[in-house]
Image (cartoon, helix red, strand yellow):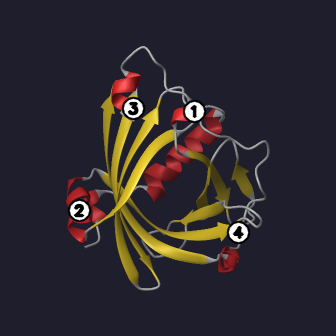
């Protein structure tokens, strides 16, 4: 489907048109030993460019994933839609050259460790993103994602415990929560092109 064309017309995109629904949670972790319970983990380096086209925010992202010594590269196009409880995403595996081209053009990026926690009895998987400071020490706040086929009546139990948590989703958060999340991204999660790793 051409969402750009559809959204510019009289038809409004609804949640049924979207193939990615995701919960985004932030947790302050006191004991990182809990991460040993993950089924697997991978190192990720990702770089992103963002464009605005009317009501759409278009993100082009390249990601390098290293798991058990195996390196793979992915290119993702993601559309964030106004007033829609989801996003549309297309991701394909690409060559190292594709990854590096986006990396070199990008405005910002993230370097993180992602830990995967499958939820028993379902096809769902918690993804816990852990970030480090300049000394290689883990930042105490982590980002936890859960991709789902539809909104859930109740969230499953989080895969790890913490001392503070932000469960509210975009559009539902308090000003204090928004300010904290913005600070996490600007000071810890997002890195500038100057810190790019070759």
Q: Is residue 75 left or right of residue 96?
A: right
Is residue 191 visible to the viewer in this orientation of the structure?
Answer: no
Q: Earlier in the sequence, mark 1 or mark 3?
A: 3
Q: Is residue 109 left or right of residue 141?
A: left
The one nearer the camera, 116 or 165, is 116
Q: Is residue 126 left or right of residue 64?
A: right
The residues tagged by marks 2 and 1 sit, at their Cα atoms, a distance apart of 31 Å
Residue denoted by label 4? 30
The residues tagged by marks 3 and 2 sit, at their Cα atoms, a distance apart of 24 Å
Circle 1 Cα neighbour tier, 10 Å, few/some/many (<14 / 14–19 / ≥20):
some
Image depth: mark 1 or mark 4 in front: 1
Residue denoted by label 3? 3
| Residue ID at (55%, 66%) | 130
| Residue ID at (49%, 75%) | 42
Q: Secondary structure at mark 1?
A: helix
Residue denoted by label 1? 15
Residue 157's quadrant in the figure?
A: bottom right
Q: Secondary structure at mark 4?
A: loop
Tag of residue 152: none
Residue furthest top as drawn:
10
Q: Where residue 126 appears, x then y in whole percent? A: 64, 62
């Amino acid at each position: 489907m051409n969402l750009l064309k559809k959204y510019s017309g009289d038809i409004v995109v609804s949640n049924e048109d979207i193939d990615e629904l995701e919960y985004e949670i932030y947790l302050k972790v006191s004991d990182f030993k809990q991460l040993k319970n993950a089924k697997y983990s991978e190192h990720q380096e990702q770089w992103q460019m963002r464009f605005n086209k009317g009501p759409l925010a278009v993100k082009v992202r390249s990601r390098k994933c290293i798991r058990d010594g195996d390196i793979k590269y992915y290119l993702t196009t993601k559309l964030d839609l106004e007033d829609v409880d989801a996003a549309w995403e297309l991701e394909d595996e690409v060559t190292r050259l594709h990854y590096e081209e986006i990396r070199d053009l990008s405005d910002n990026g993230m370097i993180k460790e992602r830990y995967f926690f499958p939820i028993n009895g379902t096809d769902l998987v918690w993804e816990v993103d852990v970030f480090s400071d300049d000394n290689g020490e883990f930042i105490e706040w982590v980002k936890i994602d859960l991709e789902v086929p539809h909104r859930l009546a109740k969230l499953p139990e989080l895969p790890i415990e913490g001392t503070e948590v932000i469960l509210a989703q975009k559009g539902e958060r308090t000003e204090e929560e928004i300010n904290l999340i913005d600070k996490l991204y600007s000071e810890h999660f997002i890195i500038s092109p100057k810190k790019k790793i070759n």
